[in-house]
Amino acid sequence: MFQSATLPQKLDKATFAALEPDLRRDLLAAQLEIIEKKPVSTIVLVAGIDGAGKGAAIARLYEWMDPRHLLCNAYGEPGEEERLRPPFWRYWRDLPAKGQTAIVFGSWYQAPMRARIDGSLSVDGFERQMAAIVRFEQMLASEGVLLLKFWFALSRETQKKRLKALKARGATARHVLDEWTGVKNHDKARAVAEQVALHTSTAFAPWVVLPSEDAQYRDAALAQTVTAAMRKALDAPDAPPPAAPAVIGGVKRISAVDAIDLSPALAEDAYEAELTRWQGRLAALVDRKAFRDIALVCAFQGNDAAGKGGTIRRVTRALDPRFYKVHPIAAPSDEERARPYLWRFWRRMPRKGHVALFDRSWYERVLVERVEGFAREADWMRAYNEINAFEAELTDFGIVLCKFWLAVSADEQLARFKAREETDYKRHKLTDDDWRNRLKWDQYAVAAGDMVDRTSTAYAPWTLVSSQDKRHARIAVLKAICKRLEKAL
Amino acid sequence: MFQSATLPQKLDKATFAALEPDLRRDLLAAQLEIIEKKPVSTIVLVAGIDGAGKGAAIARLYEWMDPRHLLCNAYGEPGEEERLRPPFWRYWRDLPAKGQTAIVFGSWYQAPMRARIDGSLSVDGFERQMAAIVRFEQMLASEGVLLLKFWFALSRETQKKRLKALKARGATARHVLDEWTGVKNHDKARAVAEQVALHTSTAFAPWVVLPSEDAQYRDAALAQTVTAAMRKALDAPDAPPPAAPAVIGGVKRISAVDAIDLSPALAEDAYEAELTRWQGRLAALVDRKAFRDIALVCAFQGNDAAGKGGTIRRVTRALDPRFYKVHPIAAPSDEERARPYLWRFWRRMPRKGHVALFDRSWYERVLVERVEGFAREADWMRAYNEINAFEAELTDFGIVLCKFWLAVSADEQLARFKAREETDYKRHKLTDDDWRNRLKWDQYAVAAGDMVDRTSTAYAPWTLVSSQDKRHARIAVLKAICKRLEKAL
């Protein structure tokens, strides 16, 4: 969820000033049309790190929208009337009517997150509460409530600075409630937020992470997301609400994939030594007796021509052919098309003691199928959730799962394409599709960024690797696999 | 789930023989059309009480359908290949292709139910597994799998007899696997099955209970349900799969509501004495200090003219007006219509120490709104689940929830309607709607039966009361409230 959350997303003053009139006009127009046609009621759920400027961002919404149809519901510790009724009562009481928009601070997520952070709630108890929340939100979605859940994200450093400044200005009392997401709990809060997102970021009510390092970017992203969601509710009521905008006022959102440092490189000599070293280490690891109780699954994704195949070969060279299999994933077969999407990957799951390497993987649904329109939006939106659940089942069972994104720059890709054209025995590797995909470079980058954000979990994190220098990539991948295996064994 | 499951549903030989050709023809026609058009793959999930004749019923399906497109997957203890992979792997491996129908014995429900029955799985762990199953089944539904889940139900007595007969015939080995739902565990199995249904009977994959006391009824109901579901997948793919058929070969399914004994009556003298006694008891109960920590909510439903109002007045007479409220539920207001369905009931939830009596209730969605078509099928189908979750939230909080169905016969209703017409001060109580509803007596009976089956839970059971004699009904209701309160206090 949070891979790209604390990247330095920025909108400078001039850009923001130029953008503001349009943002306002579009947001207000969408709101007024919702009020007139009443297709939905809207809930803007506000959560996130203390000091991220939730209040300031909402104040901006108030400024830009028609406040007569806005409610702001802030919940703290339950009051007397609330304590005397079931916990969800107060949220039901304040549900906005169709046409209205309610902004909710201190939502139904607050109590379970807080209790999880301070340790008073067990994992099982927490998951039960998350399941109850999913049921509640599913009901809201079925009943025509447009639910937008925003997580205001901030790096620890910025948070520290901001809170210090706030304190200096004498702002204390109104922050007391939020202290559980304060600096002291920053890392814990982030880990719990990831768990929350994992269970409750559904196709009908996905979380949207708002990078809040820069106030202008934050406010523009918030307004644009609300506008887009209202617009969708008006024009395509059956589609899921949109994720965070990829472009704001001409400024592209920096994704975790965009932020990969492409500079690392390895000289030939050093490479050979490292290769021998890490291949030997990998061979020794899978040879251990304890490996028979686990299994290794690696998924390789990346830009076209990033060198997935070559990297996979460097991995397999360390392995006994009896115990590994490489699965190149292309278009599904008829048999596969006739069954649920993940079937083709389940059927390739290795036994314990074995290794499966996927050259492209189950992530194709949220990459090529999304960008090329092979899957409907509702289908690839639910895929994030299904994939997270799928990977949880694998890792719960003791499978070590490594996911690699191999990145090259657009220029480097072009150079490699040309080299392939010019080399006889490489020409077959270059297809018309490759050229076509290249034209959609930006869309693929957005899809890859969303993928990394939405499917990086504690149990199955993405490893983002620069493949600008292939030697660097190969060693980085081998190293990452060894480290994960060592931890598991 | 199981209120009507063990009622003596029967199809005699002659009726069944007359019915069989149509059942076969329709089932086969639906299957062949599914094979040809491949809109879905079908899973017939078979579960239930040992000795209910699951195998025999499935054998009949094989006889009636085209077996070339039928798979039968029976799962027991995982084999070696299965143990080496995550638990769900074997179910994924065997997913039927579009056009195919798979019959599944020993499904993903088996392990958690078994572990819950023998006590090796905690409630939290069980609920976690149920949540994983719901995710899995939601994925199946989204991917175009028609999932039909049958619970073969049998009374303890019949089960005992059947198993004895089976044993006498030397049938043992093939039943070993099912022993956890044997006679010894009958009540436990039923309780766990109720929990399973509560969590996993969703709008997209509802459980269908097959009363299996009579083999012919069982097989006909199975075939008819499969046919109807396939037909729906062909004609109305977005509608949820159908519930158990209400009429088979002209024979109406006996619902729990149909089975209410209407004979009890109370003489005037006895009534007065009982009334004083139970009203006094109720007054004393709500006066206890401990009552301030709980609350009482009663929902009254029943046939028109069954005497809900009069019964409610007999209850309120025992209560202090400062602490109770009667909520007559008619058509929703504009304010209510603009919000999710349950909002109008949440807003009427009493504080602790208070009493709320609902004259008609949140059940109207699955009664009048279902029968009159005010709610779409997908909406009233999900209402069962939402209501169960709603009532769980109330009772978890300490609210005592009593739900009454007041029943009169069709003849008695007619007599009361006529009496109302003839009595000046009662005439206002009779509307054209009442006459119209009466024409749909059978449909209302089916809806009421489904409601009782699908929303009778351990924490909020239905109390079915004959109101053929009003005096009997009033005392029965007062008594039931007192008993529930006594248990809670």
Image (tube, coloured by chain):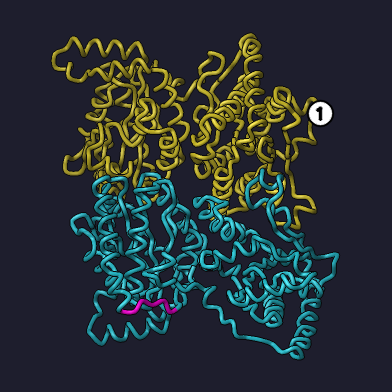
Chain colours: A yellow, B cyan
Q: Which residue is drawn at 46% across and 20% down?
A: A259
Question: Where A291 falls versus B162 (above or below)?
Answer: above
Question: Where B455 falls versus A147 (above or below)?
Answer: below
Question: To which chain does the residue with label 1 belong?
Answer: A
Left or right: where A209 falls relative to B289: left
Q: What stretch is highlighted in magenta?
A: B8-13
Between A272 and B12, the one nearer to me in the picture:
B12
Question: Where B153 falls versus A117 (above or below)?
Answer: below
Between A168 and A77, the one nearer to me in the picture:
A77
List the single residue furthest toward the left.
A424
Picture coordinates of residue A355 (x, y %)? 26, 42
Between A1 and B361, the one nearer to me in the picture:
B361
Picture coordinates of residue B423 (x, y %)? 76, 73
Quarter of image, res A280: top left
In this orientation, does residue A126 appear?
no
Left or right: where A190 falls relative to B184: right
Picture coordinates of residue A464 (x, y %)? 40, 27
Quarter of image, res A441: top left
- Magenta stretch, main secondary structure, is loop
Q: Dot 1: what SS?
A: loop
Three-letter code, disc 1: Gly
Left or right: where B321 falls relative to B13: right
Identify residue for label 1: A170
Q: Residue at x 60, y 62 (%)?
A: B436
In this orientation, does residue B477 appear?
yes
